[in-house]
Image (tube, rainbow, N blue to C red):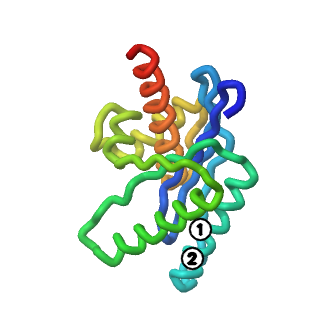
Amino acid sequence: MAGGRIVVLGLDPGSRCTGFGLISEESGCLRLIRTGTVRPQADLPLSDRLGEIYARLSSLIREFAPDEAAVEDVFVSRNTSSALKLGQARGAALVACAAHRLPVFPYEPALIKKTLVGAGRAEKSQVAFMVGQILGQRPDWSQDSSDALAAGICHLNLRRWRHLQARTG
C-alpha cells in the first residue's frame, strides 16, 4: 500500500464459479480495476476444478499485487455435499492468497449485505445495484462478480471505520 492507495481482491468462492473483483481505494475514492469469474469446466473432476481456481487466482494476485483480500464466508445450506464443495473452493482461494502472503479477511454474507444495502437479508439485485452505484459503473457483470466486489467494498468500508476508531481512541 504505497501513498495511501490500497488494492483489495474480493472473492466469492464456488466450485463451479468463483467470482473475483479488484478494487482500489485512494483518498476515500473507490475504483474498479477488474472483475470476472473463474469457471472451470463442469465435467472436470473436483480436484481439477479446485486446481484451476487456485491457478487463476494466483495469476491474478501476481498480475495485480493486491494488498489484502476479502472473502465471503461459506453459507451453510441444507445440502451437505454442496456445502463441502463450496468449502473446498473457498479453501483453494485461501491457499492462493496464502501462497502469495496476501492477508485475508472473511465476512459473513449478511454483514456484506448490511454494509452495502443497510439490510442483512437484502436481495442480490439490491447488492448488485449498490455495488454499481458505489463504483460508478453499470453492473453488467455476473452475480458472482457482484458478490465478490461487494465483499471487497465491505472490507474497505470496515477497514476505513477501524482506522477512524483507532485514531479517535
What is the three-letter code of the residue carrying label 2? Arg
**Label of residue 49 in the image:** 2
The single residue placed furthest to the front in the displayed view is: 169
163 sits left or right of 122 in the view = right
User: Quadrant where the C terminus lies?
Assistant: top left
Q: Residues within 10 Å of mark 1 (few under 14, many from 20)?
A: many
Look at 24% across and 70% down and name the residue there.
78
Residue to which mark 1 is pinned: 53
Snapshot quadrant of residue 115: top left
* Label pair 1/2, CB-CB below 8 angstroms: yes
Look at 29% across and 75% down and name the residue there.
80
User: Quadrant where the N terminus lies?
Assistant: top right
What is the three-letter code of the residue carrying label 1? Ile
The single residue placed furthest to the top in the displayed view is: 168
**Label of residue 89 in the image:** none
Look at 48% across and 66% down and name the residue there.
91
Q: Position of residue 3 (x, y in %)?
A: 71, 25
